[in-house]
Image (cartoon, rainbow, N blue to C red):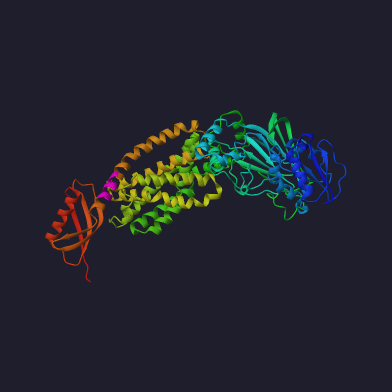
């Protein structure tokens, strides 16, 4: 090193700390130095010389501004009032370590400089409120304090109108709570909330735009940032957009307040730019040297597809933040056209209804699950149900009318063809598949609810539309209707009641769940959906009463089975039992079970077994036993 220039102030030159490190330069490193004051511009500097900046952040920023593209080599020495510069270039807080790093020629690298309205930036620019996106204190807060901070921020959630222009002249108009712009970051830096390092030498600035479009999306942002305290640029929350560009311009409707490295400023427009290789800076030990420098022009990246635009942008700027995100106008238009088409009664719909009904009825008589699954996939009933849900939440009379008409014809077709098929079929045996659809309970309602959610979501998101077949299998709309048709063909009211109750459960549960899902996805405001949801909820509450009664019987059946399923010792004979069925429809419960023992059971043994079971249950029962003898 041929020459060392120390840039400082007259005040700092007089401190003992300054004299101590100057002595270190001359005694330990055997180097000569020359002192310059910060307000003097260095015009000439030998190639191997280095300028040591013993200054605060403001004066370092001014020095860099005056020496951009000058070709001089600079290094920063740590002080209490230059924390921003230390953080930016990975400078050690220990003066001896920092000096050692500064005097190693290998640590010198051409560095890009981010300037904002002509001023160099060390760490970041904050525009608006980024809600602790850059706050290192989050890591030091307790879980309870983080929750409190989250609630406080939620109360101050407000949006500003921004027009953002990139180096490639791409313009983004959006509403955002705030924007954070930085050139690079240290993964383990105090203000970093990112999971990765961002290069100091890639020729690009990075802008994170915080714009949650609803309270729900903001709560998810809180979960990621406030609770987890880190996220990755490759997997950003949808409430955050990112722009990587060499230049960025930001304008607002009025003057924009912003912070440059914590310094509060205001301007009508903010112009930010990366100055490529603007200065040779000695990197500290906390910042790794670049392995490969960018030789080609960096590719601009704009990922803002989830930021508010159009009608949503206007809503956020003029009204209260909605709890659920409002769907984009384009998405809504495409979905609404699709659902209008699905609501129409067509010949294709009727043909599929006939075929799926005949297939389901055959599968019920065969007690064949694969055949029933095929009928479920073939059945077209789910489409008008989802269309009906959208009509309910949007209050669209035409859509409700068309959906209801299509559903009505579909139900009538299924009942007629399953009834005729049964009438012509010389079978009167209730198979296990028929019996499985005669006693619906609250669990069947839960299946309908989850299927309705999945159906609405799959229709709203084209990328998951392939899951509709799975939804159709889960909710099984046609088989219960076919069982009702079988009941009509046989003239059996108990079959008609049980199976049609299951169908109505599926229909109402799906409609209500799908309607609520459309509200959550932002396709309808709650105020508009209130009336339709009220009527649907009343019907659902009515249906729930018999389902709860059936469910209570199921609980009782399980309780009885659990109490009596064990081994008994009757007349010195060890008997194991397995409960097959429990019928609670009669005053005296009928219990069907099978027994297995190594000896033949006689009538008196079975009577004794019945007595022991009645003692366990503390009630009279009717026992129907299938005996099995085990021969060893």
Pick the residue in front: 432 or 324: 324
Q: Nearer the viewer, residue 612 or 354?
A: 612
Membership of 553 in magenta stretch = yes
Is 533 magenta? The answer is no
- Between 250 and 101, the residue placed more toward the observer is 101
Count the marks. Answer: 0
Q: Position of residue 250 (x, y in %)?
A: 71, 35
Q: Residue at x 16, y 63 (%)?
A: 573
Considering every residue shown, the one lying at the far right of the view is 44
356 relative position to 47: left or right = left
**Residue drawn at point x = 39 percent, y = 48 percent:** 414
Question: Where is 625 relative to 550, above or below?
Answer: below
User: In the rendered image, which quarter contains the C terminus?
Assistant: bottom left
Residue stretch rendered in magenta on the structure = 552-559
Counting from the top left corner in percent of width and height, residue 539 is at 38, 37
Answer with left or right where residue 603 lies relative to residue 106: left
Magenta portion: prevailing SS class: helix
Farthest residue toward the bottom? 632
Q: Position of residue 154 (x, y in %)?
A: 55, 33
Where in the figure is residue 392, as x and y percent of width and height?
A: 47, 36
Q: Is residue 119 visible?
A: no
């Amino acid at each position: 090193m041929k020459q060392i220039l120390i840039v400082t102030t007259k005040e700092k030159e007089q401190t003992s700390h300054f004299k101590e490190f100057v002595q270190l330069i001359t005694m330990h490193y055997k180097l000569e130095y020359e002192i310059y004051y910060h307000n003097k511009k260095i015009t000439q500097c030998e190639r191997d010389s280095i300028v040591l900046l013993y200054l605060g952040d403001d004066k370092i920023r001014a020095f860099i501004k005056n020496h951009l593209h000058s070709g001089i080599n600079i290094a920063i020495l740590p002080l209490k009032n230059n924390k921003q510069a230390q953080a930016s270039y990975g400078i050690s807080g220990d003066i001896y370590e920092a000096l050692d790093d500064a005097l190693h020629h290998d640590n010198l690298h051409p560095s890009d400089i981010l300037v904002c309205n002509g001023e160099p930036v060390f760490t970041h620019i904050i525009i608006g409120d980024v809600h602790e996106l850059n706050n290192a204190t989050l890591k030091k807060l307790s879980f309870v304090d983080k929750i409190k901070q989250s609630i406080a921020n939620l109360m101050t959630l407000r949006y500003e109108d921004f027009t953002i222009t990139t180096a490639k002249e791409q313009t983004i108009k959006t509403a955002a709570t705030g924007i954070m712009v930085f050139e690079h970051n240290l993964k383990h830096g105090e203000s970093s909330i990112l999971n990765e390092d961002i290069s100091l030498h890639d020729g690009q600035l990075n802008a994170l735009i915080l714009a949650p479009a609803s309270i729900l999306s903001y709560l998810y942002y809180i979960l990621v940032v406030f609770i987890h305290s880190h996220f990755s640029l490759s997997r950003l929350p949808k409430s955050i957009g990112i722009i990587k560009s060499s230049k960025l311009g930001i304008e607002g409707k009025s003057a924009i307040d912003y912070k440059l490295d914590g310094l509060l400023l205001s301007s009508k427009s903010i112009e930010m730019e990366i100055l490529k290789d603007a200065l040779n800076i000695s990197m500290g030990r906390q910042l790794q040297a670049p392995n490969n420098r960018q030789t080609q022009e960096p590719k601009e990246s704009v990922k803002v597809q989830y930021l508010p635009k159009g009608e949503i942008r206007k809503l956020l700027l003029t009204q209260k933040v909605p709890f659920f995100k409002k769907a984009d106008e384009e998405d809504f238009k495409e979905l609404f056209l699709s659902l209008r088409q699905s609501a129409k009664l067509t010949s294709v719909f009727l043909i599929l209804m006939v075929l799926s009904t005949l297939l389901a009825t055959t599968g019920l008589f065969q007690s064949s699950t694969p055949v029933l699954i095929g009928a479920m996939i073939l059945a077209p009933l789910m489409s008008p149900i989802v269309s009906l849900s959208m009509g309910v939440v949007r209050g669209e009379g035409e859509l409700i009318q068309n959906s209801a008409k299509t559903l009505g014809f579909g139900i009538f077709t299924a009942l007629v063809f399953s009834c005729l098929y049964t009438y012509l079929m010389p079978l009167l045996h209730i198979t296990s598949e028929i019996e499985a659809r005669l006693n619906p309970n609250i669990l069947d309602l839960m299946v309908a609810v989850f299927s309705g959610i999945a159906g609405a979501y799959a229709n709203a998101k084209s990328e998951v539309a392939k899951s509709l077949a799975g939804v159709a299998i889960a909710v099984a709309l046609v088989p219960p209707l076919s069982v009702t048709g079988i009941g009509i063909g046989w003239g059996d009211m108990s079959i008609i009641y049980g199976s049609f109750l299951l169908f109505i459960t599926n229909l109402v549960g799906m409609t209500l769940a799908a309607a609520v899902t459309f509200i959550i996805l932002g396709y309808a405001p709650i105020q508009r959906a209130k009336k339709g949801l009220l009527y649907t909820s009343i019907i659902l509450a009515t249906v729930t009463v018999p389902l709860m009664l059936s469910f209570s019987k199921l609980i009782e059946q399980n309780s009885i089975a659990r109490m009596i399923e064990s081994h008994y010792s009757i007349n010195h004979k060890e008997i194991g039992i397995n409960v097959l069925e429990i019928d609670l429809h009669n005053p005296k419960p009928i219990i069907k079970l099978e027994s297995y023992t190594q000896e033949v059971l006689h009538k008196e043994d079975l009577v004794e077994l019945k007595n022991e079971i009645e003692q366990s249950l503390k009630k009279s029962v009717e026992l129907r036993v299938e005996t099995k003898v085990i021969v060893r």
